[in-house]
Amino acid sequence: MILVLLIFTLAFPISTHASSVKLVKITETTPVFDDTQKVAVFQKGTSHTVIKESDRFYHTIMGNDEVKFSKQRARVIQNNPGNWKGAHPVRATTSTHVNIMDRPSVKATVLGSIQPKMTIYVQRLKGVYYPILVGGQTGYIHKDQLKIESGIPVLMYHDIVTSKSDQNTSTLEIQKFREQMNYLKKNGWTTITPHQLEAWVTKQIALPKKSVLITFDDGYASTIDLAYPILKQHGFQATSFLITSRINRPGMVSDQDIARTQDVYSYQNHTHVFHMFNNLTNLSLLQYESEYAILEDLQQANGIIEDILGPDYTVTAHAYPYGKRSPQAIRALLSAGITSAYTIDEGNVFQGDSIFELKRQRVHSNMTLKDFANRLEGK
């Protein structure tokens, strides 16, 4: 299994300085390795971006994972080849040797191949091909050569509206939300809580195959006025990540809303006042504030929610503002008693995933019901 997942980035698992990135051409067909085994083959004449090098190997990325190949079978053809980031929200396994093509066509050139029984990450299906980041470029794998692993979807919603009045894709029309919930009910999906998902990820419990965690960010009043009746009608559970400094503001949930809707919602932490972003640095407060300052904010948010819901209630989950996080933020989460945390990185959740790096599937107004169904299945 190719498995070198690095954390703390949104779109791509490894970050390097541009000056350290090189483009090399394969001079002789070469095996490709992870830390323990051969995982793929790169064909002679193909070019790949190198993100770092060691004494004997060039290192590059395949899907979400770091792999390496012999320096003796490649030569540098370009320094500083530019930006080559990619996000891979679909997880798949190979049952046989899988060819990676240079374009989505039966007449394409083979860039290389992947060994059987490998776990890889690819982009969402385009026609009959799955795009994959391989050595700094996009390759293509035919859908019939991969088995998609579904995992468990964590749906991410924000505001629900009766009708759209702007181009904000994060606001979802009530009719589309109703259709999606009807689809879940009709097709036998079971809604779960963050506690259940955490126990499943850490292999403590089993869950039904069609399990889904429904989440809402920020604490909009629409989660009560519009979403709650539909969720309750279907017997569904959901999770609301609250920015606690906004409770009781116009358009946001109130203390009373929170107290009376526990039969549907699990209320969790989305910071108190640290839901802010610095446009000059492209960083959130959870990335550049101190561990102590972050901890204070998290504890304040926990305390407000727990005071509303009573002494028997404990906040255990967090959603990172803008999906951005840092080592000091994760340490602060642990100190605050948070045992799982959610990003905005797209994809489903799998057993063994980092419990503080859980992915979600963003639901937006441009999504069709077929798109929604595919997200559930991890496609």
Image (spheres, rainbow, N blue to C red):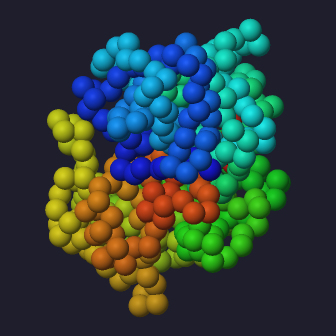
Q: Is residue 304 above or below residue 318?
A: below
Q: Which residue is at the far top?
A: 107
Q: How far across and down, in percent of the image, does residue 69 sit? A: 49, 33
For the question of whether residue 163 can be seen, the reply is no
Examine the image and state in which quarter residue 193 appears: bottom right
Q: How far across and down, in percent of the image, does residue 135 sit? A: 49, 27
Residue at 44%, 73% in the rendered image: 339
Residue at 33%, 69% in the rendered image: 333
Examine the image and state in which quarter residue 72 appears: top left
48 with respect to 337 (left or right)? right
Q: Nearer the viewer, residue 19 or 303?
A: 19
Q: Is residue 362 above or below residue 19?
A: below
104 with respect to 290 (left or right)? right
For the question of whether residue 146 can be seen, the reply is yes
Q: Nearer the viewer, residue 134 or 330?
A: 134
90 with respect to 274 (left or right)? right
| Tally of numbered discs | 0
Quarter containing the C terminus: top right
Q: Nearer the viewer, residue 157 or 30?
A: 30
Residue at 41%, 90% in the rendered image: 311
Residue at 38%, 41% in the rendered image: 14
Q: Which residue is at the far bottom?
A: 311
Q: How far across and down, in percent of the image, does residue 107 sit? A: 74, 9
Q: Nearer the viewer, residue 166 or 351?
A: 351
Q: How far across and down, in percent of the image, does residue 220 sit? A: 44, 55
Q: Is residue 226 above or below residue 107?
A: below
